[in-house]
Amino acid sequence: MNSKKKLKTTCSYCGVGCGILAEVNPQAKVSVQGDPEHPVNAGMLCSKGMNLHYVVNDTSDRILYPEMRWSRTHPRQRVTWDEALDRAAAVFKSLIRKHGPNSVGFYISGQCLTEEYYIANKLAKGFLGTNNIDTNSRLCMSSAVVAYKKTFGEDSVPISYADIELADTFLIAGANPAWNHPILFRRLEKHKEKNPNTKVIVVDPRKTDSASFADIHLQLIPGTDIILYNAIGRRLIETGYADESFVKNHTENYQAYRKQVMETSLKDAAALCGITVDEIKEVSELIGKAKGFISMWAMGLNQSSIGTDKNFALLNLSLVTGKVGKPGNGPFSLTGQPNAMGGREVGGMANLLAVHKDLQNPQHRQDVADFWGVDQISPTPGYTATEMFDALASGEMKAVWVICTNPMVSLPNLGQIEKAFANAKFVVVQDISHRSDTVAYADLVLPAAGWLEKEGTMTNSERRISYLNKGINPPGEARPDVEILCDFAKRMGFRGFNFANAEEIYEEYCAMTKGTNIDISFLNYDRLKNEGSIQWPVPEYRHPGTARLFADKKFYTPSQKAIFNIPAQIENTSEKISAEFPFVLTTGRIRDQWHTMTKTGKVARLRTHYAQPVLEISRLDGYIYKVKDGDVVEVKSKNGIVRVRAKISNSVRNGVVFLPMHWGKQLENDLNRANNLTFTRVDPQSKEPDFKYTTVSVTKY
Ligand code: SF4
């Protein structure tokens, strides 16, 4: 008898959201393959997804039981769950009594399942009385969120992956999907193979694999993106490609847009961006005459101190050409994490409320309070990711509960994060792995269940909700995150957390969506299990899901028109190149690693691509600065130092260096961390940190 179990689930890494068939043998060992029936990946998996079973089967790094220390001078010791959660509740009660609810906070993750996100938000905003709950999605998509809300009236990605096969022109901006969204990129490659007239334009200071595949690579000077998109907008208007009817009937604020784009000549724009006028004209022509124009972007736009403005400038290209709401047309932000969108749906950031309601809106706050049966939601905006750690460092916040993320590697300005943890009175880390650098700073460590060890849902980049199956039990005493949070809430004395399982939490959230633009009130676990994933909104029983928004050209703004937002600043001037710091450092990801390598770093075959972090520097800069391939170099910013080997590369512009963001102290040493160099400098609208523009020096060590 074959007692192997086969389960359908979803990859836990990137926002593409590939379907996986997991097989569990009688010894609870897991193997994986792509789900051939899944609409996203049709059986394909990238290197990370196809090695996911190694991560699950190797439990050597797992946190197996709660650990606690009574003071910073004592080592952590194993404790029972009762001792752990009683202490957490006692400390939170005491801090809130003495210093108020804003003295505590949660820093969570775009890898949390929707049910986990929902419960953490209900706990913080509804019952603890603080909006201090933010997430590492702040480092990922928050600039796009602000831009979507201001342009379309709500945080709504208009299109689907299926639009890729309907488009003929793609503008990929500040993203390297060939490495970071590989299965999505594979769809684009296949589409171009079948339709050779399809044009791909990549805008990136680096010649990435995506740029190498492109028909046109605009290797612009970092920080000049808005100048480029405005120049394209100007050229589109001047050559008659503006869709006057769409602009007149379905948009607002066009004249202000027109005025701004006309302020800079193509010649000046080209010079500022470090490209040619002909390139701007050629790209404009392709976009203007496209039958299907899709823009895709990721961190190169979002992770910037002018990230929201960059998003506006790119979205405006879809508006001015009227290429939105039609098959094969529209803007498409590429979510980095598997459930960053699900988190946004349930209000998973310090300035949001569930079901896309706004914390600033008194009626929205009351709606949410009424739904949860509490008097009110505090109107005080919570601390965002970087603000939260600043508040811990300054003593304004006393306690932080970190779930499923590793800020000691991933946040900017790691010196400040170390200070924050050292100064915090109480640090809880709820995670699966001892490989997280953040665990070392915890007063209380809570072992969580990982992928395939719990059930729940996630939403990918195209609004597709999928169900994740439980196939095995978590090791040791690890528990699902929702169970831990509900247990804690009950010990705090809060009602409203008596859920028998994740499904009941999901159902509560679904009921909350009724009548909203993200209505999934008819989408239950049974349907997701039996029929597979589906795109929101799903507003009626048997509704097939919604592949494309705004087909009726009615946007979610009060006027139902899309809005041209005008960038307040067109160039990143947050730092100036100087003789002391002559390079712009940009950080990012490499093909086979994920975030801070707590999972992918365990897999030997994924470490062969890059065994160590290396600094990419151009051949000319290597010659000028006497750096040879393989030399150890010291990279310095005003903030810190990194020492890594140099890689002479034809892929970066002269004057630009690139460093991967994955490595932390645990894996190598603390001089490997890209975020020693970066600053706590954020976009004023989205509060997303700038990881793409730090001036540095590079010298042979
Ligand atoms: Fe997983 Fe993303 Fe790779 Fe798909 S593309 S297998 S979701 S990491």
Image (cartoon, rainbow, N blue to C red):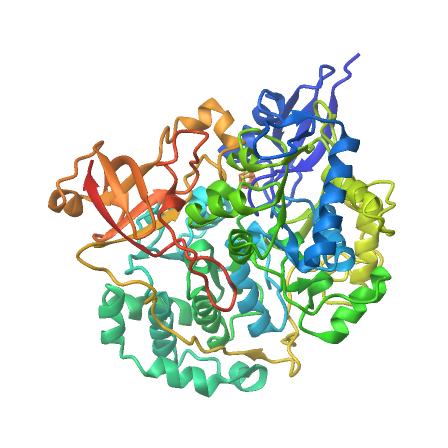
Q: Is residue 280 left or right of residue 394?
A: left
Identify the residue at image location x=45%, y=47%: 177
Q: Is residue 517 left or right of residue 280?
A: right
In this view, 6 is above or below 156: above
Q: Report if residue 33 is visible in the image.
A: yes
Camera-side residue: 351 or 551?
A: 351
What is the quadrant of residue 428 in the picture? top right
In this view, 155 is above or below 414: below
- Residue 313 at what x, y percent from top left? 43, 71
Q: Report if residue 331 is visible in the image.
A: no
In this view, 355 is above or below 113: below
Camera-side residue: 288 or 147?
A: 147
In this view, 553 is above or below 298: below
What is the quadrant of residue 456 in the picture? top right
Identify the residue at image location x=41%, y=48%: 176
Rendered-image quadrant of the C terminus: top left
Identify the residue at image location x=59%, y=70%: 149
Camera-side residue: 576 or 500?
A: 576
Identify the residue at image location x=29%, y=57%: 219
- Residue 561 at what x, y percent from top left? 60, 80
